[in-house]
Image (cartoon, grey):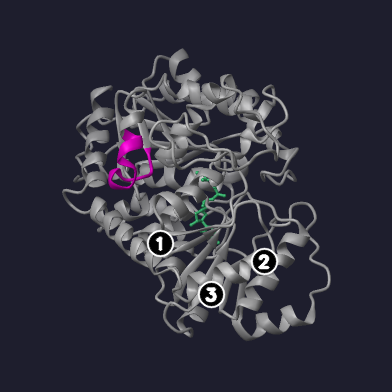
Protein backbone atom coordinates (compact mmCIF):
# COMPACT_ATOMS: atom_id res chain seq x y z
CA UNK A 1 0.00 0.00 0.00
CA UNK A 2 2.69 2.47 -1.08
CA UNK A 3 1.87 6.16 -1.48
CA UNK A 4 1.35 6.98 -5.13
CA UNK A 5 2.67 9.94 -7.10
CA UNK A 6 0.66 13.17 -7.21
CA UNK A 7 0.20 13.00 -10.99
CA UNK A 8 -2.09 9.91 -10.91
CA UNK A 9 -5.73 10.97 -10.28
CA UNK A 10 -6.65 9.62 -6.87
CA UNK A 11 -9.97 9.31 -5.07
CA UNK A 12 -11.02 12.24 -2.91
CA UNK A 13 -13.01 10.87 0.00
CA UNK A 14 -15.12 13.01 2.32
CA UNK A 15 -15.59 11.38 5.72
CA UNK A 16 -18.38 12.37 8.12
CA UNK A 17 -18.41 10.78 11.60
CA UNK A 18 -21.15 11.19 14.20
CA UNK A 19 -19.63 13.92 16.41
CA UNK A 20 -18.57 11.74 19.37
CA UNK A 21 -15.22 10.33 20.44
CA UNK A 22 -16.11 6.68 19.79
CA UNK A 23 -17.06 7.49 16.20
CA UNK A 24 -14.37 10.06 15.33
CA UNK A 25 -11.45 7.92 16.43
CA UNK A 26 -12.04 4.83 14.22
CA UNK A 27 -13.08 6.96 11.25
CA UNK A 28 -9.94 9.04 11.59
CA UNK A 29 -7.83 5.88 11.64
CA UNK A 30 -9.54 4.82 8.42
CA UNK A 31 -8.74 8.27 6.98
CA UNK A 32 -5.07 7.71 7.77
CA UNK A 33 -5.03 4.33 6.04
CA UNK A 34 -6.72 5.75 2.94
CA UNK A 35 -4.32 8.70 2.87
CA UNK A 36 -1.44 6.32 3.09
CA UNK A 37 -2.82 4.63 -0.03
CA UNK A 38 -2.59 7.96 -1.84
CA UNK A 39 -6.16 9.21 -1.43
CA UNK A 40 -7.10 12.81 -0.71
CA UNK A 41 -9.25 12.99 2.43
CA UNK A 42 -11.49 15.75 3.73
CA UNK A 43 -12.47 14.83 7.29
CA UNK A 44 -15.50 16.74 8.53
CA UNK A 45 -15.94 17.42 12.24
CA UNK A 46 -18.40 19.66 14.00
CA UNK A 47 -17.06 23.11 14.90
CA UNK A 48 -17.17 22.05 18.56
CA UNK A 49 -14.97 18.96 18.05
CA UNK A 50 -12.77 20.66 15.46
CA UNK A 51 -11.31 22.90 18.16
CA UNK A 52 -10.66 19.94 20.48
CA UNK A 53 -8.70 17.67 18.11
CA UNK A 54 -4.97 18.17 17.93
CA UNK A 55 -4.40 18.26 14.16
CA UNK A 56 -0.70 19.11 14.15
CA UNK A 57 0.52 15.51 14.08
CA UNK A 58 -1.77 14.65 11.15
CA UNK A 59 -0.58 17.54 8.98
CA UNK A 60 3.04 16.45 9.19
CA UNK A 61 2.27 12.77 8.54
CA UNK A 62 -0.44 13.15 5.91
CA UNK A 63 -0.43 16.39 3.90
CA UNK A 64 -3.36 15.02 1.87
CA UNK A 65 -5.59 14.77 4.95
CA UNK A 66 -7.39 18.00 5.80
CA UNK A 67 -9.94 18.84 8.46
CA UNK A 68 -13.04 20.94 7.88
CA UNK A 69 -15.99 21.65 10.11
CA UNK A 70 -19.71 22.34 10.19
CA UNK A 71 -21.97 23.46 13.08
CA UNK A 72 -23.85 20.93 15.21
CA UNK A 73 -26.50 23.43 16.22
CA UNK A 74 -26.02 22.91 19.96
CA UNK A 75 -25.05 25.70 22.35
CA UNK A 76 -21.38 25.61 23.50
CA UNK A 77 -22.38 24.65 27.02
CA UNK A 78 -24.34 21.52 25.90
CA UNK A 79 -22.42 18.59 27.44
CA UNK A 80 -22.88 16.30 24.39
CA UNK A 81 -23.42 13.21 26.52
CA UNK A 82 -25.93 10.38 26.40
CA UNK A 83 -27.95 11.41 29.37
CA UNK A 84 -31.73 11.03 29.09
CA UNK A 85 -33.22 14.21 27.72
CA UNK A 86 -29.92 15.47 26.26
CA UNK A 87 -29.38 12.57 23.83
CA UNK A 88 -32.24 13.42 21.41
CA UNK A 89 -31.00 17.04 20.93
CA UNK A 90 -27.63 15.71 19.95
CA UNK A 91 -28.92 13.01 17.61
CA UNK A 92 -31.51 15.13 15.84
CA UNK A 93 -29.33 18.19 15.36
CA UNK A 94 -27.12 16.04 13.10
CA UNK A 95 -30.09 15.91 10.73
CA UNK A 96 -31.69 19.30 11.07
CA UNK A 97 -28.65 21.55 11.44
CA UNK A 98 -25.64 19.64 10.14
CA UNK A 99 -27.20 18.19 7.00
CA UNK A 100 -27.71 21.41 5.00
CA UNK A 101 -24.29 22.65 6.14
CA UNK A 102 -22.71 19.39 5.05
CA UNK A 103 -24.40 19.66 1.67
CA UNK A 104 -23.13 23.23 1.21
CA UNK A 105 -19.65 22.07 2.15
CA UNK A 106 -19.63 19.16 -0.33
CA UNK A 107 -20.94 21.46 -3.08
CA UNK A 108 -18.12 23.89 -2.35
CA UNK A 109 -15.60 21.03 -2.45
CA UNK A 110 -16.97 20.01 -5.85
CA UNK A 111 -16.34 23.52 -7.17
CA UNK A 112 -12.80 23.85 -5.84
CA UNK A 113 -10.06 24.60 -8.28
CA UNK A 114 -6.42 23.81 -7.68
CA UNK A 115 -4.92 20.66 -6.36
CA UNK A 116 -8.07 19.18 -4.74
CA UNK A 117 -10.27 17.26 -7.18
CA UNK A 118 -14.06 17.04 -6.60
CA UNK A 119 -15.15 14.41 -4.06
CA UNK A 120 -15.35 10.92 -5.55
CA UNK A 121 -16.84 9.19 -2.50
CA UNK A 122 -18.45 9.96 0.85
CA UNK A 123 -17.90 7.67 3.82
CA UNK A 124 -20.84 8.23 6.14
CA UNK A 125 -21.10 7.13 9.74
CA UNK A 126 -23.79 4.45 10.13
CA UNK A 127 -25.88 6.89 12.18
CA UNK A 128 -25.38 9.89 9.87
CA UNK A 129 -27.89 9.12 7.14
CA UNK A 130 -27.91 12.80 6.29
CA UNK A 131 -24.56 12.18 4.58
CA UNK A 132 -26.16 9.40 2.52
CA UNK A 133 -28.98 11.78 1.51
CA UNK A 134 -26.42 14.42 0.49
CA UNK A 135 -24.37 11.88 -1.47
CA UNK A 136 -27.48 10.79 -3.38
CA UNK A 137 -28.62 14.36 -4.02
CA UNK A 138 -25.19 15.23 -5.41
CA UNK A 139 -24.73 11.86 -7.14
CA UNK A 140 -21.58 10.96 -5.26
CA UNK A 141 -20.98 7.27 -4.38
CA UNK A 142 -21.36 6.51 -0.68
CA UNK A 143 -20.03 3.88 1.71
CA UNK A 144 -21.30 3.42 5.26
CA UNK A 145 -19.13 2.82 8.34
CA UNK A 146 -20.94 1.58 11.45
CA UNK A 147 -18.68 1.98 14.45
CA UNK A 148 -20.29 -1.04 16.17
CA UNK A 149 -19.19 -4.65 15.89
CA UNK A 150 -20.96 -6.93 13.40
CA UNK A 151 -23.21 -8.53 16.03
CA UNK A 152 -24.61 -5.24 17.31
CA UNK A 153 -25.05 -3.98 13.76
CA UNK A 154 -26.93 -7.19 12.91
CA UNK A 155 -29.20 -6.74 15.94
CA UNK A 156 -30.02 -3.20 14.85
CA UNK A 157 -31.24 -4.59 11.54
CA UNK A 158 -33.74 -6.79 13.46
CA UNK A 159 -35.37 -4.13 15.60
CA UNK A 160 -38.35 -3.68 13.29
CA UNK A 161 -38.90 -7.44 13.23
CA UNK A 162 -38.72 -7.57 17.04
CA UNK A 163 -41.31 -4.79 17.26
CA UNK A 164 -43.61 -6.73 14.93
CA UNK A 165 -43.23 -9.79 17.14
CA UNK A 166 -44.10 -7.73 20.22
CA UNK A 167 -40.63 -8.16 21.79
CA UNK A 168 -40.01 -4.40 21.80
CA UNK A 169 -40.73 -2.07 23.52
CA UNK A 170 -40.16 -3.17 27.10
CA UNK A 171 -39.18 -1.53 30.33
CA UNK A 172 -37.71 -3.53 33.14
CA UNK A 173 -40.21 -6.42 32.75
CA UNK A 174 -39.14 -10.01 32.11
CA UNK A 175 -35.61 -8.96 31.25
CA UNK A 176 -34.27 -12.53 31.13
CA UNK A 177 -36.69 -13.56 28.40
CA UNK A 178 -34.69 -15.13 25.52
CA UNK A 179 -34.65 -13.41 22.14
CA UNK A 180 -34.66 -16.27 19.69
CA UNK A 181 -35.44 -14.69 16.35
CA UNK A 182 -32.08 -13.18 15.40
CA UNK A 183 -30.16 -15.72 13.33
CA UNK A 184 -26.72 -16.70 14.71
CA UNK A 185 -27.52 -15.07 18.06
CA UNK A 186 -30.49 -17.31 19.02
CA UNK A 187 -28.89 -18.79 22.11
CA UNK A 188 -27.10 -15.69 23.29
CA UNK A 189 -29.49 -12.80 23.68
CA UNK A 190 -32.01 -12.00 26.36
CA UNK A 191 -34.17 -8.90 26.48
CA UNK A 192 -31.64 -7.16 28.67
CA UNK A 193 -28.91 -7.75 26.08
CA UNK A 194 -30.70 -5.78 23.38
CA UNK A 195 -29.44 -2.24 22.71
CA UNK A 196 -30.53 0.34 25.29
CA UNK A 197 -32.79 2.04 22.74
CA UNK A 198 -35.20 -0.92 23.05
CA UNK A 199 -35.86 -0.12 26.73
CA UNK A 200 -38.64 2.35 26.06
CA UNK A 201 -42.33 2.73 26.82
CA UNK A 202 -43.56 3.01 23.27
CA UNK A 203 -42.48 2.23 19.74
CA UNK A 204 -42.90 5.89 18.81
CA UNK A 205 -40.00 6.80 21.07
CA UNK A 206 -37.96 9.25 18.97
CA UNK A 207 -34.55 7.78 19.83
CA UNK A 208 -35.72 4.25 18.95
CA UNK A 209 -37.15 5.60 15.69
CA UNK A 210 -33.91 7.49 15.02
CA UNK A 211 -31.87 4.27 15.16
CA UNK A 212 -34.39 2.33 13.05
CA UNK A 213 -34.27 4.98 10.33
CA UNK A 214 -30.50 5.36 10.43
CA UNK A 215 -29.96 1.61 10.21
CA UNK A 216 -32.35 1.24 7.28
CA UNK A 217 -30.60 4.10 5.45
CA UNK A 218 -27.27 2.27 5.59
CA UNK A 219 -28.53 -0.19 2.97
CA UNK A 220 -28.44 2.60 0.37
CA UNK A 221 -24.63 2.63 0.54
CA UNK A 222 -22.51 0.59 -1.86
CA UNK A 223 -20.57 -1.10 0.94
CA UNK A 224 -20.31 -1.51 4.71
CA UNK A 225 -17.14 -0.97 6.74
CA UNK A 226 -16.81 -2.45 10.24
CA UNK A 227 -14.05 -2.11 12.82
CA UNK A 228 -13.98 -5.82 13.64
CA UNK A 229 -12.21 -8.88 12.27
CA UNK A 230 -13.58 -11.88 10.44
CA UNK A 231 -12.27 -14.52 12.83
CA UNK A 232 -14.16 -12.93 15.76
CA UNK A 233 -17.59 -12.68 14.15
CA UNK A 234 -17.60 -14.79 10.99
CA UNK A 235 -21.19 -16.18 11.22
CA UNK A 236 -22.79 -12.78 11.77
CA UNK A 237 -20.63 -11.08 9.14
CA UNK A 238 -21.77 -13.72 6.71
CA UNK A 239 -25.43 -12.97 7.63
CA UNK A 240 -24.85 -9.26 7.03
CA UNK A 241 -23.81 -10.30 3.53
CA UNK A 242 -27.51 -10.82 2.83
CA UNK A 243 -27.98 -7.05 3.26
CA UNK A 244 -24.74 -5.58 1.92
CA UNK A 245 -23.13 -6.68 -1.34
CA UNK A 246 -19.73 -5.70 0.01
CA UNK A 247 -18.50 -5.76 3.62
CA UNK A 248 -15.02 -4.73 4.66
CA UNK A 249 -14.02 -5.76 8.17
CA UNK A 250 -10.76 -3.93 8.86
CA UNK A 251 -10.30 -4.08 12.61
CA UNK A 252 -8.77 -3.67 15.02
CA UNK A 253 -8.05 -0.43 13.19
CA UNK A 254 -5.45 0.77 15.68
CA UNK A 255 -3.47 -2.43 15.12
CA UNK A 256 -3.93 -2.30 11.36
CA UNK A 257 -2.55 1.24 11.37
CA UNK A 258 0.51 0.08 13.22
CA UNK A 259 1.00 -2.84 10.87
CA UNK A 260 0.47 -0.88 7.63
CA UNK A 261 1.96 2.52 8.41
CA UNK A 262 5.30 1.77 9.98
CA UNK A 263 6.98 4.80 8.41
CA UNK A 264 4.58 7.38 9.99
CA UNK A 265 3.74 6.07 13.48
CA UNK A 266 0.97 7.79 15.43
CA UNK A 267 1.96 10.21 18.15
CA UNK A 268 0.34 12.11 21.03
CA UNK A 269 -0.68 14.79 18.54
CA UNK A 270 -2.33 12.38 16.12
CA UNK A 271 -4.42 9.96 18.14
CA UNK A 272 -7.86 11.39 17.44
CA UNK A 273 -8.50 12.14 21.11
CA UNK A 274 -10.89 14.98 21.90
CA UNK A 275 -9.39 15.34 25.36
CA UNK A 276 -5.86 15.84 26.57
CA UNK A 277 -4.44 12.55 27.77
CA UNK A 278 -2.71 12.48 31.14
CA UNK A 279 0.40 10.39 30.56
CA UNK A 280 1.52 10.46 34.20
CA UNK A 281 -0.55 7.34 34.79
CA UNK A 282 1.95 5.37 32.66
CA UNK A 283 4.68 6.24 35.17
CA UNK A 284 2.37 5.12 37.98
CA UNK A 285 1.76 1.86 36.10
CA UNK A 286 5.52 1.35 35.77
CA UNK A 287 5.71 1.10 39.55
CA UNK A 288 3.05 -1.65 39.79
CA UNK A 289 3.59 -5.44 39.61
CA UNK A 290 2.74 -7.25 36.37
CA UNK A 291 -0.97 -7.88 35.71
CA UNK A 292 -1.89 -6.44 39.11
CA UNK A 293 -3.87 -3.33 38.09
CA UNK A 294 -7.55 -3.08 37.22
CA UNK A 295 -8.04 -0.26 34.71
CA UNK A 296 -11.42 1.49 34.99
CA UNK A 297 -13.01 3.70 32.35
CA UNK A 298 -16.57 4.32 31.21
CA UNK A 299 -15.75 5.85 27.83
CA UNK A 300 -16.75 9.23 26.52
CA UNK A 301 -20.54 9.50 26.77
CA UNK A 302 -21.76 7.39 29.71
CA UNK A 303 -22.90 9.31 32.78
CA UNK A 304 -22.87 7.99 36.36
CA UNK A 305 -25.02 9.09 39.27
CA UNK A 306 -23.29 10.11 42.44
CA UNK A 307 -24.45 6.88 44.13
CA UNK A 308 -23.11 4.72 41.29
CA UNK A 309 -19.75 6.44 41.51
CA UNK A 310 -19.60 5.62 45.23
CA UNK A 311 -20.58 1.97 44.67
CA UNK A 312 -17.76 1.54 42.14
CA UNK A 313 -15.33 3.36 44.39
CA UNK A 314 -16.15 1.23 47.44
CA UNK A 315 -16.04 -1.96 45.36
CA UNK A 316 -12.64 -1.09 43.93
CA UNK A 317 -11.14 -0.13 47.28
CA UNK A 318 -12.63 -3.22 48.96
CA UNK A 319 -11.18 -5.49 46.25
CA UNK A 320 -7.74 -4.45 47.52
CA UNK A 321 -6.38 -4.40 43.95
CA UNK A 322 -4.42 -1.46 42.59
CA UNK A 323 -6.68 0.55 40.29
CA UNK A 324 -6.26 3.18 37.60
CA UNK A 325 -9.54 5.05 37.13
CA UNK A 326 -10.44 7.53 34.38
CA UNK A 327 -12.86 10.11 35.74
CA UNK A 328 -13.38 12.39 32.82
CA UNK A 329 -14.94 15.82 33.21
CA UNK A 330 -18.68 15.31 32.78
CA UNK A 331 -18.72 11.73 34.11
CA UNK A 332 -21.37 12.84 36.61
CA UNK A 333 -23.26 14.78 33.98
CA UNK A 334 -24.49 18.18 35.04
CA UNK A 335 -24.21 17.08 38.67
CA UNK A 336 -20.41 17.34 38.78
CA UNK A 337 -20.07 17.73 42.56
CA UNK A 338 -18.72 14.55 44.20
CA UNK A 339 -19.30 15.90 47.70
CA UNK A 340 -17.23 14.86 50.67
CA UNK A 341 -15.28 11.64 50.10
CA UNK A 342 -15.53 9.04 52.87
CA UNK A 343 -12.21 8.62 54.70
CA UNK A 344 -11.84 4.93 53.83
CA UNK A 345 -12.09 5.74 50.11
CA UNK A 346 -9.46 8.46 50.43
CA UNK A 347 -7.15 6.07 52.27
CA UNK A 348 -7.69 3.19 49.82
CA UNK A 349 -7.11 5.49 46.85
CA UNK A 350 -3.94 6.98 48.31
CA UNK A 351 -2.59 3.49 49.02
CA UNK A 352 -3.50 1.73 45.79
CA UNK A 353 -5.25 4.05 43.36
CA UNK A 354 -4.49 6.47 40.58
CA UNK A 355 -7.25 8.73 39.20
CA UNK A 356 -6.82 10.71 35.97
CA UNK A 357 -9.13 12.84 33.83
CA UNK A 358 -8.32 11.05 30.55
CA UNK A 359 -5.74 8.34 29.85
CA UNK A 360 -3.74 7.16 26.84
CA UNK A 361 -6.01 4.12 26.84
CA UNK A 362 -4.39 1.99 24.15
CA UNK A 363 -1.02 2.30 25.90
CA UNK A 364 -2.58 1.65 29.30
CA UNK A 365 -4.21 -1.56 28.09
CA UNK A 366 -0.94 -2.70 26.52
CA UNK A 367 1.01 -1.99 29.73
CA UNK A 368 2.37 -5.11 31.47
CA UNK A 369 0.93 -3.96 34.82
CA UNK A 370 -2.70 -4.04 33.64
CA UNK A 371 -4.48 -7.31 34.33
CA UNK A 372 -8.15 -6.38 33.90
CA UNK A 373 -10.47 -3.71 32.53
CA UNK A 374 -13.69 -2.52 34.18
CA UNK A 375 -15.40 -0.97 31.17
CA UNK A 376 -18.74 0.32 29.90
CA UNK A 377 -18.28 -2.01 26.91
CA UNK A 378 -18.07 0.64 24.20
CA UNK A 379 -16.91 -1.09 21.06
CA UNK A 380 -13.61 0.76 20.72
CA UNK A 381 -12.68 0.04 24.33
CA UNK A 382 -13.73 -3.59 23.98
CA UNK A 383 -11.68 -4.06 20.83
CA UNK A 384 -8.66 -2.34 22.38
CA UNK A 385 -8.94 -4.72 25.34
CA UNK A 386 -9.33 -7.71 23.02
CA UNK A 387 -6.16 -6.81 21.15
CA UNK A 388 -4.23 -6.35 24.40
CA UNK A 389 -5.55 -9.69 25.72
CA UNK A 390 -6.93 -7.97 28.84
CA UNK A 391 -10.06 -9.65 30.30
CA UNK A 392 -13.01 -7.40 31.13
CA UNK A 393 -15.78 -6.71 33.60
CA UNK A 394 -18.49 -4.88 31.63
CA UNK A 395 -21.01 -2.40 32.96
CA UNK A 396 -23.00 -1.46 29.85
CA UNK A 397 -25.19 1.65 29.78
CA UNK A 398 -26.17 2.89 26.33
CA UNK A 399 -26.48 1.98 22.64
CA UNK A 400 -24.53 -1.15 21.62
CA UNK A 401 -22.94 -1.64 25.04
CA UNK A 402 -25.65 -4.08 26.22
CA UNK A 403 -25.06 -6.60 23.40
CA UNK A 404 -21.30 -6.03 23.54
CA UNK A 405 -21.11 -7.04 27.20
CA UNK A 406 -23.11 -10.19 26.46
CA UNK A 407 -20.76 -11.10 23.62
CA UNK A 408 -17.78 -10.52 25.92
CA UNK A 409 -19.16 -12.79 28.64
CA UNK A 410 -21.11 -15.48 26.80
CA UNK A 411 -20.08 -15.54 23.14
CA UNK A 412 -16.34 -14.97 23.41
CA UNK A 413 -15.83 -15.87 27.09
CA UNK A 414 -13.36 -13.05 27.71
CA UNK A 415 -14.99 -11.29 30.65
CA UNK A 416 -17.87 -10.89 33.07
CA UNK A 417 -21.11 -8.97 32.58
CA UNK A 418 -22.31 -6.73 35.43
CA UNK A 419 -25.36 -5.70 33.45
CA UNK A 420 -28.05 -3.77 35.36
CA UNK A 421 -26.35 -4.11 38.71
CA UNK A 422 -24.26 -1.52 40.46
CA UNK A 423 -23.45 -2.70 43.90
CA UNK A 424 -20.15 -2.46 45.77
CA UNK A 425 -20.15 -6.16 46.73
CA UNK A 426 -20.62 -7.24 43.10
CA UNK A 427 -17.90 -4.86 41.91
CA UNK A 428 -15.56 -6.23 44.55
CA UNK A 429 -16.37 -9.87 43.72
CA UNK A 430 -16.08 -9.50 39.96
CA UNK A 431 -12.83 -7.56 40.19
CA UNK A 432 -11.38 -10.16 42.57
CA UNK A 433 -12.56 -13.06 40.38
CA UNK A 434 -11.06 -11.51 37.29
CA UNK A 435 -7.77 -10.39 38.83
CA UNK A 436 -7.14 -13.46 40.96
CA UNK A 437 -7.42 -15.75 37.95
CA UNK A 438 -10.42 -17.61 39.41
CA UNK A 439 -11.80 -17.74 35.90
CA UNK A 440 -8.89 -19.41 34.14
CA UNK A 441 -10.95 -20.00 30.98
CA UNK A 442 -11.42 -16.22 30.63
CA UNK A 443 -7.66 -15.65 30.65
CA UNK A 444 -7.13 -18.42 28.10
CA UNK A 445 -9.85 -17.14 25.75
CA UNK A 446 -8.55 -13.58 26.06
CA UNK A 447 -5.06 -14.70 25.05
CA UNK A 448 -6.40 -16.77 22.15
CA UNK A 449 -8.67 -14.03 20.76
CA UNK A 450 -5.89 -11.47 21.16
CA UNK A 451 -3.65 -13.67 19.02
CA UNK A 452 -6.39 -13.87 16.37
CA UNK A 453 -6.73 -10.10 16.40
CA UNK A 454 -2.98 -9.63 15.93
CA UNK A 455 -2.94 -12.19 13.11
CA UNK A 456 -5.78 -10.47 11.26
CA UNK A 457 -3.71 -7.31 10.75
CA UNK A 458 -0.49 -9.01 9.70
CA UNK A 459 0.36 -9.50 6.03
CA UNK A 460 -2.07 -12.07 4.59
CA UNK A 461 -4.48 -11.64 7.56
CA UNK A 462 -8.18 -10.92 6.96
CA UNK A 463 -8.21 -7.23 7.91
CA UNK A 464 -4.88 -6.65 6.20
CA UNK A 465 -6.36 -7.97 2.93
CA UNK A 466 -9.73 -6.27 3.41
CA UNK A 467 -8.29 -2.77 3.57
CA UNK A 468 -6.74 -3.39 0.15
CA UNK A 469 -10.12 -4.56 -1.14
CA UNK A 470 -11.79 -1.45 0.28
CA UNK A 471 -9.18 0.74 -1.40
CA UNK A 472 -9.82 -1.07 -4.67
CA UNK A 473 -13.59 -0.69 -4.26
CA UNK A 474 -13.26 3.05 -3.56
CA UNK A 475 -11.14 3.48 -6.69
CA UNK A 476 -13.59 1.44 -8.77
CA UNK A 477 -16.56 3.69 -7.95
CA UNK A 478 -14.71 6.93 -8.90
C1 LIG B 1 -19.86 4.88 22.14
C2 LIG B 1 -20.35 3.42 22.01
O1 LIG B 1 -20.55 2.78 23.21
C3 LIG B 1 -19.50 2.64 21.07
O2 LIG B 1 -19.71 1.27 21.14
C4 LIG B 1 -19.80 3.18 19.75
O3 LIG B 1 -19.21 2.41 18.75
C5 LIG B 1 -19.30 4.61 19.77
O4 LIG B 1 -19.95 5.36 20.80
P1 LIG B 1 -17.71 5.60 23.74
O5 LIG B 1 -18.47 5.81 24.97
O6 LIG B 1 -16.93 6.74 23.26
O7 LIG B 1 -18.53 5.05 22.49
O8 LIG B 1 -16.76 4.36 24.03
P2 LIG B 1 -15.72 3.61 23.13
O9 LIG B 1 -16.31 3.09 21.89
O10 LIG B 1 -15.10 2.61 24.01
O11 LIG B 1 -14.65 4.71 22.71
C6 LIG B 1 -13.91 5.44 23.64
C7 LIG B 1 -12.57 5.76 23.02
O12 LIG B 1 -11.95 6.74 23.84
C8 LIG B 1 -11.63 4.57 22.97
O13 LIG B 1 -11.03 4.48 21.70
C9 LIG B 1 -10.60 4.86 24.04
O14 LIG B 1 -9.29 4.43 23.72
C10 LIG B 1 -10.64 6.34 24.15
N1 LIG B 1 -10.31 6.74 25.53
C11 LIG B 1 -11.16 6.46 26.54
C12 LIG B 1 -9.11 7.38 25.75
O15 LIG B 1 -8.32 7.62 24.83
N2 LIG B 1 -8.82 7.72 27.03
C13 LIG B 1 -9.63 7.47 28.07
O16 LIG B 1 -9.29 7.84 29.19
C14 LIG B 1 -10.85 6.81 27.82
Task: Examine the structure image and report whether residue 447 is included in the region drawn in magenta.
Answer: no
Queried on whether the Cβ of the residue with tag 3 lies below 8 angstroms from ligand 1, the answer reads: no
Residue 246, position as x, y percentages in the image? 29, 27
Residue carrying label 2: 312
Give the alpha-carbon distance from disc 2 to disc 3, as whole Å.
Answer: 20 Å
Which residue is most to the left?
460
Left or right position of 357 against 393: right
Residue carrying label 1: 267
The residue that appears at 79% across and 77% down in the rendered structure is 342
Task: Examine the structure image and report whether residue 232 is included in the region drawn in magenta.
Answer: yes
Residue carrying label 3: 281
- Residue 169 visible? The answer is yes
Residue 107, position as x, y percentages in the image? 47, 20
Give the alpha-carbon distance from disc 1 to disc 2, as whole Å.
Answer: 32 Å
Earlier in the chain: of badge 1 and badge 2, it is: 1
Earlier in the chain: of badge 2 and badge 3, it is: 3
Q: Is residue 90 above or below residue 303?
A: above
Question: What segment is highlighted magenta in the picture?
Answer: 226-237
Element at label 2: helix
- Give 181 or 56, whichever is nearer the viewer: 181
Queried on whether the Cβ of the residue with tag 2 lies below 8 angstroms from ligand 1, the answer reads: no
- Give 311 or 286, whichever is nearer the viewer: 311
- Give 291 or 37, whichever is nearer the viewer: 291
Q: Nearer the viewer, mark 1 or mark 2?
A: 2
Q: Is residue 108 above or below residue 464?
A: above
**In the picture, which quadrant includes the N terminus?**
top left
Label 3 crowd (10 A; few <14 / some 14-19 / many >=20): some
Residue 88, position as x, y percentages in the image? 69, 33
Element at label 3: helix
Amino acid sequence: MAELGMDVPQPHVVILPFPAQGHIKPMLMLAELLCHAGFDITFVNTDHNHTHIDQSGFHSRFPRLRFMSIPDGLPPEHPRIFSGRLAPDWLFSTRSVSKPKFKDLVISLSQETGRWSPPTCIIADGIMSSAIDVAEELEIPVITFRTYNAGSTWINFHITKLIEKGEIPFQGDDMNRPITSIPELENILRRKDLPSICRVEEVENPVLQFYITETAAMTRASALILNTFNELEAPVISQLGSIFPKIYTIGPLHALLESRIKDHPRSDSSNGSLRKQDRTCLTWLDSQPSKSVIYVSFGSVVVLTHDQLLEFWHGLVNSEKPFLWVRRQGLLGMDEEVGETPAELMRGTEERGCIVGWAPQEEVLAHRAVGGFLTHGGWNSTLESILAGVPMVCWPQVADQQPNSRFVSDLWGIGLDMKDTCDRSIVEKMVRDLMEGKRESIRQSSAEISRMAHDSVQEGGSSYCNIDKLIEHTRSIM
